[in-house]
């Protein structure tokens, strides 16, 4: 399945592009080779294998006050020459009609190399062996006639990229991702419940070793048991009460109500047409209370194995760990160097592109909520009445990333500091900053889970990228909680 000789193709294409580059103020050439394979078994039947591969180059150049870019999958001298010519045409148009001076565009002479740590490469097991594993997991999900749909899958992808610049910059990265997962759907009478697991909410960088690390096979009976038990569970109560969120749900809470609102191009209005704006404004940075003093959120592309770890972003800016929110106070946005120059705000190395045919834009990378020192039992022990929730199943947030409503797969009642029985169809709602100000407890390092989102969409044309989120369990006070019969 591997693209034959992809590293050699990247090197040769970059070398060829250097020789063809026109005389401009600055240029970058980003060559990308991608491959992916998805294997799945549903109800004991092997589904068609999905294999994708692609290769191409994105050229960006600056001439005077204009910036232009062009992409091509034709890596010949003629294809590259044509891409440079199109980029020059766009640069001339931008010089006349652009919203900002292209001289603001960041230049890079950074040299970096990053490779995902992979202990067991994808190709070390045959397709037959992988499908046998999925069949075993799938069979372990079908424990009861009330399980009407059940499936197991493995999603793998590999991205090789080389960025070179006219200033002598060179950033090479080889990223490998594995996302296994299980799902079981149970039905009885008029009630249907779904549970996922086996790593479904914890995609990450690495190889097949992640299967055992995530307890893929061992999770199957629990996933099926939960789905069946939820059929007979009472509805989640409705009212204002305390809420304990497990890492599987915290991932999306961070993603939607911290990550997206802090994207600087969104704050500047660039994303307004497609996925909304943000309630955050430039004057908030440095003083705005985004959450309680327990809220510490970092941008950290240096975490080994997290989905969006890298040494430099797609403009060649070195990546480093920085605080976005410290002790509840908003410090900096998620903006690459171009957005930083346009806004006058400090940002991060997060100019990222999806594939060879998209330009970099401001994206989340690894956005992590830093742990503290409280155990899960300790958090639960401080709750008189509340609900513990895990695993997202539905979400809604307004076009300023402010008011939200989330539904979860599983809930458990908490009464007088003790965890009680299951409740089904749990949900909660809130307003982003008000919700984070209600943060009353943050879990310890032992509960800190590295997960993420494998399909974060943004941009026109759309760019779906991998985004990492690591977080412990958390306690929130006086949250609006509801059930399916609200």
Image (cartoon, grey):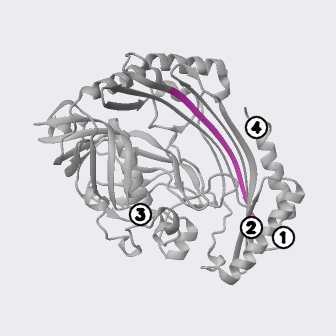
Question: Element type at marker 4?
Answer: loop
The mark that comes first in sequence, 3 or 4, is 4
Report, in whole angstroms, how far the alpha carbon at label 3 lies from the one at label 4. 40 Å
In this orientation, which residue lies closer to the viewer: 309 or 355?
A: 355
Q: Pointer 3: what residue?
A: 399
Quarter holding the N terminus is: top right
Report, in whole angstroms, how far the alpha carbon at label 2 lies from the one at label 4. 27 Å
Identified at 77% across, 43% down, the residue is 7
The mark that comes first in sequence, 3 or 2, is 2
Mark 2 touches mark 1? (CB < 8 Å): yes
In this orientation, which residue lies closer to the viewer: 292 or 143?
A: 143
Q: Which residues are magenta?
A: 152-166
Identified at 68% across, 63% down, the residue is 109
Q: Find residue 433 and report its image quarter.
A: bottom left
Report, in whole angstroms, how far the alpha carbon at label 1 lies from the one at label 3. 42 Å
Question: Element type at marker 2?
Answer: strand
Question: Element type at marker 1?
Answer: loop
Task: For label 3, count other residues whose C-alpha is less than 10 Å away and answer few (under 14), some (14-19) or many (20+).
Answer: some
Question: Residue 27's mark?
Answer: 2
Q: Pointer 4: what residue?
A: 3
The mark that comes first in sequence, 1 or 4, is 4
């Amino acid at each position: 399945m591997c693209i034959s000789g992809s590293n050699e193709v990247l090197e040769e294409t970059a070398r060829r592009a250097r020789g063809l580059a026109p005389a401009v103020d600055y240029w970058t050439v980003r060559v990308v080779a991608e491959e992916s394979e998805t294997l799945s078994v549903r109800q004991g039947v092997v589904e068609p294998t999905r294999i994708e591969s692609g290769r191409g180059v994105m050229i960006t150049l600056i001439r005077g006050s204009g910036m232009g870019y062009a992409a091509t999958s034709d890596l010949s001298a003629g294809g590259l020459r044509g891409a440079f010519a199109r980029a020059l045409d766009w640069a001339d148009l931008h010089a006349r009609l652009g919203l900002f001076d292209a001289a603001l565009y960041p230049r890079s002479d950074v040299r970096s190399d990053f490779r995902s740590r992979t202990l067991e490469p994808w190709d070390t097991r045959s397709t037959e062996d992988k499908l046998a594993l999925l069949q075993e997991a799938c069979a372990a999900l079908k424990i009861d006639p009330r399980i009407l749909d059940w499936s197991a899958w493995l999603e793998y992808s590999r991205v090789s990229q080389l960025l070179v610049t006219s200033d002598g910059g060179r950033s090479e990265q080889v990223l490998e991702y594995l996302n296994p997962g299980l799902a079981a759907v149970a039905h009885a009478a008029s009630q249907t419940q779904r549970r996922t697991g086996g790593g479904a909410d914890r995609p990450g960088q690495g190889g097949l070793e992640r299967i055992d690390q995530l307890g893929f096979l061992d999770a199957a009976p629990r996933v099926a048991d939960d789905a069946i038990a939820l059929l007979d569970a009472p509805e989640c109560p409705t009212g204002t009460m305390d809420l304990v969120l497990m890492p599987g749900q915290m991932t999306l809470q961070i993603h939607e109500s911290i990550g997206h609102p802090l994207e600087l191009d969104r704050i500047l209005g660039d994303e307004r047409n497609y996925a909304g704006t943000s309630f955050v404004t430039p004057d908030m940075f440095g003083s705005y209370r985004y959450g309680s003093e327990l809220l510490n959120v970092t941008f950290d592309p240096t975490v080994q194995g997290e989905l969006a770890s890298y040494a430099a972003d797609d403009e060649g800016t070195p990546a480093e760990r920085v605080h976005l929110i410290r002790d509840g106070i908003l410090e900096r946005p998620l903006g690459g160097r171009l957005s930083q120059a346009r806004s006058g705000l400090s940002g991060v190395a997060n100019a990222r592109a999806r594939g060879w045919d998209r330009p970099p834009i401001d994206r989340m990378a690894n956005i992590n909520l830093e742990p503290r020192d409280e155990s899960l039992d300790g958090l639960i022990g401080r709750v008189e009445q509340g609900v513990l929730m895990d695993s997202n199943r539905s979400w809604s947030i307004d076009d300023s990333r402010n008011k939200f409503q989330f539904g979860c797969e599983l809930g458990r009642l908490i009464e007088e500091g003790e965890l009680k029985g299951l409740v089904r169809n749990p949900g909660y709602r809130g307003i982003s900053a008000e919700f984070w100000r209600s943060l009353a407890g943050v879990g310890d390092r032992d509960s800190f889970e590295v997960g993420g989102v494998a399909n974060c969409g943004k941009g026109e044309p759309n760019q779906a990228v991998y985004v990492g989120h690591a977080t412990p369990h958390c306690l929130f006070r006086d949250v609006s909680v509801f059930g399916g019969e609200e």
